[in-house]
Image (cartoon, rainbow, N blue to C red):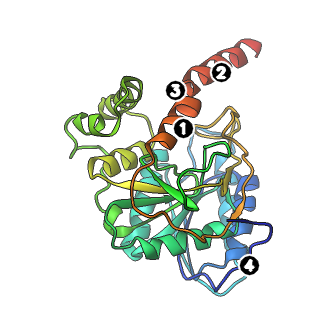
Amino acid sequence: MIVEKFIPPHPLKTPVLFLIFKRLDTTKQVFEQIKKAKPPRLYIAADGPRDYVEGEAEKVKAAREYVLSNIDWNCEVKTLFREKNLGCGKAVSEAITWFFENEEQGIILEDDTVPSQSFFWFCEELLNRYKDEKKVWHIGGTNFQDGIIRGNGDYYFSALNHIWGWASWADRWKYYDFKLEKISDDSFLKKIFKSSKEYKYWKSIFEKMKSDKPIDTWDYQWTFTMWFNGGLAVLPNVNMVSNIGFCEDATHTKIENELSNKQKYELLIVKHPASVERNVTADEYTFKNHYAQGPIILKIINKLKRFLR
C-alpha cells in the first residue's frame, strides 16, 4: 500500500552497508536517507583511487570524509577503505563479503541509489519473514513494471534480482562465486528461461563472464549464483529506489535511460503473497521492455554522442 508520508513503526534494527567511491553529490543524497533511517550499525566501504585518473584521490577522500563527519546518530561504525583501486568487481563483492562476515543479514546501498524511507523497513520485515525460506535469496527495492501490479500482494517474486538497493542474508551470500568456478555450463539457464531470446541474452552474458576478459562487475555473478541454487528475489509492486548515477562520471551507467531517476514511493506492507512462486509474466515484461532492446539503444546513443563530440 502506497502512503503519502511514512512513519517508522519502530527504530530500525537492521545494519546497512554503504558503498561509496568518488561522487560526492550522489553520496550526499543517499546518505541523507540513511541518516533519517538511523541504522544501529553502519558499514562504509570505498575502493581506492586510480593512479592514472587525475584528481580522483581528492574526490575519494572528500566522499569518505563527508560520510564520516556527518554521522549524527548513535551507531556502531565500521570502515573498509582501500588504498589501491581494486575495480568495481572485486571492490564491491569483497566489501559485501566483509559485511556478511560480520552480520547475519543486512541492507546494501551504493552511492547512487536513493531509497525511500520505507525501503529500510520493507527490507527489515522481509529479511525476518523469509530468513528460513531458502527459496528467497534477495530483496530488491526497484520496480520496472511501469505501474502494473503483479499478484495480489504488495510485492512479488522474481528471478531478476535488481541490485539498486537490496538486502540479503549471509547464509545465501556465502555461495557467491566471483569467478563462477562452481558453475561449469549454462544448463541452469534453460530451466529458468523458456523463450529463446531470454535464454540467448543471458547465455551471452554468462559466456562473457566466463571468458578470459570478463566484465569488471560483481552483480552478474550474484545473479548466476542465485539462479544456479534455485533462488528467487522479492521485488516491490511500486518503485522504492531511484538510481541517480547515470552520468559521464559513472563506471557503467553513463547514459540516462527510462530506468534512471525513476520516481520512488513509500510502501507499507499490508498484504503478503499467498505463496513463494515466481511471477513469470512480470519477468517477461521486464525483459521485453527494459532488457531486450536496452543494450542496442545504448550502443546507438553512445555512438551518436561520440560522433557529436
Q: Residue at x 36, y 68 (%)?
A: 170
Mark number, residue 144: none
Crowd band around label 2 with a 10 angstrom C-alpha radius: few (<14), some (14–19), many (20+): some
Residue at figure coordinates x 67%, y 72% from the top left: 68
- Quadrant where the N terminus is found in the figure: bottom right
Q: Residue at x 51, y 33 (%)?
A: 287
269 or 175: nearer the viewer: 269
Tag 1's secondary structure?
Answer: helix
Q: CA distance from mark 2 to mark 1?
A: 23 Å
Q: Amino acid at mark 2?
A: Asn
Is residue 131 shown left or right of residue 24?
A: left
Residue at 44% across / 69% down in the picture? Answer: 99
Instruction: Kindly state the secondary structure of the residue where label 3 is placed.
Output: loop
Disc 3, disc 2: CB below 8 Å? no
Q: Kindly report which numbered mark, 3 or 2, lies closer to the viewer in this rendering.
A: 3
Q: Amino acid at mark 4?
A: Ile
C-beta proximity under 8 Å, tags 2 and 4: no
Q: What kind of element bears circle 2?
A: helix
Query: Residue 5 vs residue 297: left or right?
Result: right
Measured in 3D between alpha carbons, the distance from the residue under mark 1 to the one under mark 4, in whole angstroms, is 31 Å
> Badge 1 is on which residue?
286
Mark 2 sits on what residue? Answer: 302
For the residue marked with disc 1, what is the amino acid? Thr
Of label 2 and label 4, which has the lower sequence position? 4
Pointer 3 or 1: first along the chain: 1
Q: Specify which label sits upstream in the sequence, 2 or 1.
A: 1
Residue designated by label 3: 292
Q: Which residue is mark 4?
A: 7
How far apart are the two marked residues, 3 and 2, measured between alpha carbons?
A: 17 Å
Image coordinates of residue 232 in percent, x first then y, are: 39, 54
